[in-house]
Amino acid sequence: MTVLLDKNKPFFKANLHAHSTQSDGTQSVETLKEAYKKHGYSIVAFTDHEHLIDNSHLDDREFLTITSCEVAIKEFANLSTLKKLDMRVCHLNFYALDQHNVVTPCYSSTYDHFLNDSIRSLVRYEKDYERTYSKDGINEMIKIANEQGFLVAYNHPTWSLENATDYIHYENLFAVEIYNHSCVLGGRIDDEHAFDDFLRAGKRIFCSAADDNHNLRGLDSPGDDSFGGWVQINAEKLEYGAVMNALQSGNFYASTGPSILALEKDGEQVRIETSPCQKICLTTKGRRTQTVTAENGANLTHATFSLREDDGFFRIRVIDEKGKKAWTQAYSPLD
């Protein structure tokens, strides 16, 4: 039997995409820490725009920060996506494998308008890098970030106006956002289709869900963009190395509500245990799918699916009575 998500190890709730007053968010990292802890989170990646800051002074026995940032590569570098609304853009999150690595890969002063003078004075970088919006230019940035010790995630393809003809060429990504809470609140669809596009193109990639919160409406107000999308990281302990190793290995799942308690593969079968839900669905590389649906008035808490060699990959989606979803990573039926 192969344990894919281990119920005997803890799961740590994490928001991997957050903005604070260190760029264009309205809340300080200190305020966000307390708010996320209150909502059951153990981890936040403060992915403020265009620069890295070590926020490890916030860490305690129950809370961990991931040193990270979000960078943009635009079709027209000097134009704003808030003004040129039809401009394509690629947004990437860089997650440092070493918590104290604060040298920003591919830093560009063209994009540093998010920074005030006090923040700009903290930025560390090797040189002013000229970014190019093209598959080669984006792949070079991913490569540089990987070489400098970062996992690289691809953010909100639909908001970015990118489709498979654009992103299918991106190489060596760690993850793609399958759900971005801020974007969905704004009326956009989730990006589950992009995950399958990558997988069906033979890419090894994981999926994540995140808030991308800026808190423009204030924490806990109606329509606030916090606490809507997260990952549950199946790590040995709440320490930086263990958490980053779990992320790098794909030992996590994405969610907007349901919990996945265990996932095990035994020969040609896979079994999942969940919080109470209404539907559990298996997706493969081809057209073959399987779905288990709760009977009227009842809930599901587990399902077992058959696997075939020609499935290519399989992944599982869980849907609860409110329509909230959770997604596993994709796995090979042969492993």
Image (cartoon, rainbow, N blue to C red):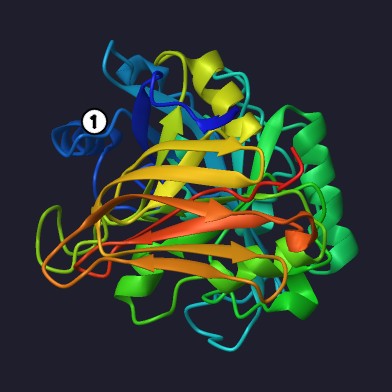
Instruction: Work out whether residue 288 or residue 215 is closer to the camera in this orientation and state it.
Output: 288
Query: Where does the image place residue 250, in percent across and percent down from the top left?
Result: 60, 36
Instruction: Work out whether residue 98 or residue 126 is closer to the camera in this orientation and state it.
Output: 98
- Which residue does the image show at 27% across and 70% down from the upper left? 323
- Which residue does the image show at 15% across and 62% down from the upper left? 298
- Which residue does the image show at 84% across and 65% down from the upper left? 169
Quadrant of the image for the C terminus? top right
Q: Is residue 296 left or right of residue 287?
A: left
Q: Is residue 82 above or below residue 276?
A: below
Quadrant of the image for the N terminus? top right
Q: Is residue 109 left or right of residue 289?
A: right
Label 1 is placed on what type of residue?
Glu
Query: Where does the image place residue 163, in percent across and percent down from the top left?
Result: 68, 79
- Image-quadrant location for residue 223: bottom left
- Residue placed under numbered mark 1 in the picture: 30
Query: Where does the image place residue 102, in percent across and percent down from the top left?
Result: 60, 26
Q: Is residue 141 left or right of residue 118?
A: right
Specify whether residue 316 is in view. Answer: yes
Query: Where does the image place residue 192, in percent across and percent down from the top left?
Result: 53, 68
